[in-house]
Amino acid sequence: MYKSRPLSPSTASRLASYSSTAAVGALSLASSNAAIVYVNAGNTLLPDPIATDTFFGIYPADLNFDGVSDLRFAVRAGTSEFNPSRAVVIAANQVGSAVGVIGQTIDSYPYADRLAAGVLIDGSSGFLVLTQQAANPASMAFGQGYPNSQWAFAGSNSGYLGVRFNIGTAEHFAWMRLTVEPESSATPRAITVHEWAFEDAPGIGIETGAVPEPSALGLLALGSVGLSARRRRKLA
């Protein structure tokens, strides 16, 4: 069952600071040229707040800091046969919301791919479409480590999530570097968000792990929570 729980004051403060402070910095770098926007998420841990019940911890992600949630992560830490641990990606909690993540459907169940560095994310990628109305998830890890859950196993639980999301009505592409804790962890299926980046030009692809060049516009520190953003102008 998906049910949001109140976040701890420290987590809520950190995520709120990401959205509000970073919005100012990102917009101040606005340009008519396509550029990569990079965010250091400070290795933020997203755990299940109460691991003994059947509900999920729900965490929204606002990738471009416009005050609109683009997707959500859901974490459950249960280890029983009927309420297994899991980590999934779901759409934002608003009517009409849709987001795509690179993945595949196996036996009628959607799985989010764990990508390596250097994979191109663009319009030709195979996206799973997640919609708010159906609340359909893309599984990252599930139960006892279902073999089709690509983030499920210790030693193979870090990688890149490929994302397609909208800014207004325009389609953009992004990567997120994540780690999903194995079921044997002290925080089963907790997701650590390390960093992400997106192309601010609509329809322009981005490679997983791509960041702005250090010489371009430099690094802008945003707030006291370790969040930063930087952009690289595209060569003509």
Image (cartoon, helix red, strand yellow):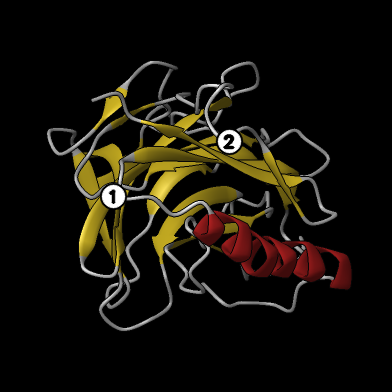
Q: Position of residue 38 (x, y in %)?
A: 54, 39
Q: Amino acid at mark 2?
A: Leu
Q: Amino acid at mark 1?
A: His
**Residue 69 tag number:** none
Task: Judge whether 165 appears above or below 60 on screen.
Answer: above
Q: Position of residue 73 (x, y in %)?
A: 53, 57
Rate crowding at label 1 as few (under 14), some (14 to 19) or many (20 or more) other CA atoms within 10 Å.
many
Which element type, helix, strand or loop, lies under badge 1?
Answer: strand
Is residue 106 rendered to the left or right of residue 13?
left
Q: Residue furthest left?
A: 124
Quadrant in the rendering for residue 143: top right
The answer, for residue 21, to whether it is visible in the render is yes
**Residue 178 tag number:** 2
Count of numbered tags: 2
Q: Position of residue 34 (x, y in %)?
A: 31, 40
Asked if labels 1 and 2 touch by Cβ distance under 8 angstroms, the answer is: no
Name the residue nearer the viewer: 147 or 157: 157
Task: Judge whether 196 appears above or below 12 on screen.
Answer: above
Which element type, helix, strand or loop, lies under badge 2?
Answer: strand
C-alpha separation, residue under disc 2 versus residue under disc 1: 19 Å
The answer, for residue 1, to whether it is visible in the render is no
Of callouts 2 and 1, the N-terminal one: 1
Quadrant in the rendering for residue 117: top left
Task: Judge whether 145 appears above or below 202 on screen.
Answer: above
Is residue 108 rendered to the left or right of residue 166?
left
Q: Residue shown at 38%/38% (left/top)?
A: 35
Q: Residue shown at 25%/34% (left/top)?
A: 205
Q: Residue shown at 53%/40% (left/top)?
A: 196
- Residue at mark 1: 172
Q: Position of residue 193 (x, y in %)?
A: 64, 42
Name the residue nearer the viewer: 108 or 34: 34
